[in-house]
Amino acid sequence: MAGIIGLGKYLFIIPMLVFGILHLMNAREMAGMAPFGGQLMVYVSGIGLLAAALSVIIGKYDKLACTLLALMLLIFALTIHLPNLLNADDPAIQAASMGNFLKDIGLTGGALMAAKLAKDDAVIG
């Protein structure tokens, strides 16, 4: 059973890997969603997603990485998806924004749980 539960952290980082790659591949198209910084912020967030995933895989600075990932995802939820949810006139955009808002809130919770279970206390204990 412990082996199956141990898979959780790897399943959790699969979306981070995919989203990180998508941010790097589609930065121009995603730039309009960034609250500031445009394409540069899309690249920075993509690198952050990939760095957090790599940190979990290798087990170095994983507590710090998951804590910072949680903060980044919460910022995404509150500054990108919530405003779109509240201000969109199109019901389809509102529905997509609700899904993205809930996804980022859920992933924030997952990142905080991963930080709690992380082994590397080198930076934050």
Image (cartoon, rainbow, N blue to C red):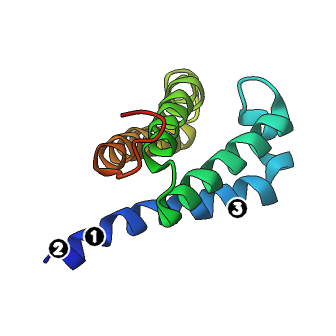
Write the residue at 46% across / 50% down: 62
Do the CB atoms of the residues marked 2 and 1 lie less than 8 Å apart? yes
**How many C-alpha atoms fall within 10 Å of the one at disc 3: few (<14), some, or many (≥20)?**
some
Secondary structure state at the residue bearing disc 1: helix
Q: Amino acid at mark 2?
A: Ala
Residue 113 coordinates in the image, percent (x, y): 30, 45
Q: Quadrant of residue 93?
A: top right
Residue 82 coordinates in the image, percent (x, y): 50, 27
Q: Quadrant of residue 12?
A: bottom left
Q: Nearer the viewer, residue 84 or 75?
A: 75
State the separation of the CA atoms marked 2 and 1.
6 Å
Do the CB atoms of the residues marked 3 and 2 lie less than 8 Å apart? no
In the picture of the structure, the residue carrying the numbered disc 2 is 2
Q: How many marks?
A: 3
Q: Earlier in the sequence, mark 3 or mark 1?
A: 1
In the picture of the structure, the residue carrying the numbered disc 1 is 6
Q: Nearer the viewer, residue 29 or 123?
A: 123
Q: Amino acid at mark 3?
A: Ile
Q: Amino acid at mark 1?
A: Gly
State the separation of the CA atoms marked 3 and 1.
24 Å
Q: Can you say which quadrant of the picture contains the C terminus? A: top left
Do the CB atoms of the residues marked 3 and 1 lie less than 8 Å apart? no
State the separation of the CA atoms marked 3 and 2.
30 Å
